[in-house]
């Protein structure tokens, strides 16, 4: 049974339009707080380090509130991982859909990447840092949504056009995704000043240089 929350003045119960995508309209306030708190803690500290008590305390609820919605901490982490991963995949697929050249597909990839950096960096960090741990446990439908395959398709198109070097596509995928992932980590640790978007043009030029013929 849900226990009474230890309410915080700065945690309103009512959802608003700016709430993250992984919150559903029908989610009760306790679940909303638990999901937001857990994602932040998982992204910053790692799933293994974070405890149920820590999530509940920082969300303003006691432990039984979490277990009302998720049987274990790992179930909570998997729910968040799949929600964040699938949302990122769908945004990338939409951004690349119908694009007719590598350059336009790269523009789409970077548009999604920088929007994620500025609007929900924690979700991006959580996905990229827990992919190896979580991927074996995701559903069959999520397994069919490969972000790496989307980027590989774009690079193969570039190879066919002659705008990307004729190299092993998997090595090119590693080069592109590795650059983006490290930039996200460095941005999180404030090794880059200003907004993420201020670095987009330079980062895009670097990626083009890495894959250029």
Image: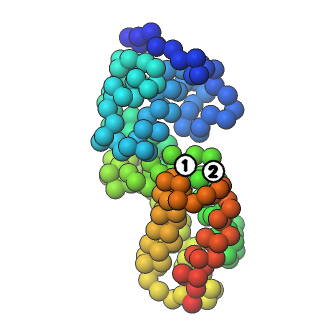
Looking at the image, what colour scheme do you see?
rainbow
Where is the N terminus found, in terms of image quarters?
A: top left
Horizontal and vertical percent position of residue 211:
55, 82
Q: Which mark is residue 118?
A: 2
Q: Nearer the viewer, residue 24 or 59?
A: 59
* Residue 41: quarter of image: top left
* Residue 161: quarter of image: bottom right
Q: CA distance from mark 2 to mark 1?
A: 6 Å
Element carrying mark 2? helix
Where is the C terminus found, in terms of image quarters?
A: bottom right
Packing grade of label 2 (10 A; few <14, some 14-19, many >=20) is few
Horizontal and vertical percent position of residue 169:
47, 79
For residue 92, side relative to residue 170 (left or right): right
Figure check: 114 above or below 204: above
Mark count? 2
Q: Nearer the viewer, residue 26 or 133?
A: 133
For residue 148, side relative to residue 19 (left or right): left
Q: Is residue 200 visible?
A: yes
Residue at 39% in and 29% down: 55
For residue 193, side relative to residue 70 (left or right): right
Q: Nearer the viewer, residue 173 or 195?
A: 195
Q: Say which residue label 1 marks.
A: 121
């Amino acid at each position: 049974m849900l226990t009474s929350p230890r309410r915080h003045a700065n945690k309103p119960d009512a959802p608003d339009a700016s709430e993250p995508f992984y919150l559903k309209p029908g989610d009760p306030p306790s679940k909303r707080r638990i999901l937001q708190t857990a994602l932040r803690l998982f992204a910053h500290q790692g799933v293994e380090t974070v405890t149920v008590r820590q999530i509940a305390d920082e969300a303003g609820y006691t432990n039984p509130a979490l277990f009302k919605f998720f049987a274990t901490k790992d179930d909570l982490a998997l729910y968040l991982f799949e929600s964040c991963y699938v949302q990122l995949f769908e945004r990338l697929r939409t951004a690349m859909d119908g694009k007719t050249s590598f350059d336009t597909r790269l523009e789409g990839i970077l548009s999604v990447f920088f929007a994620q950096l500025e609007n929900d960096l924690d979700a991006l960090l959580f996905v990229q840092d827990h992919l190896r741990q979580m991927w074996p446990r995701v559903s069959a439908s999520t397994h069919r949504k490969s972000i790496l395959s989307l980027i590989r398709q774009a690079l193969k198109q570039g190879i066919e056009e002659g705008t990307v070097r004729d190299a092993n596509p998997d090595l090119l995928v590693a080069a592109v995704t590795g650059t983006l992932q490290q930039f996200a980590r460095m941005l999180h640790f404030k090794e880059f000043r200003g907004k993420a978007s201020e670095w987009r043009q330079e980062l895009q030029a670097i990626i083009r240089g890495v894959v250029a013929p």
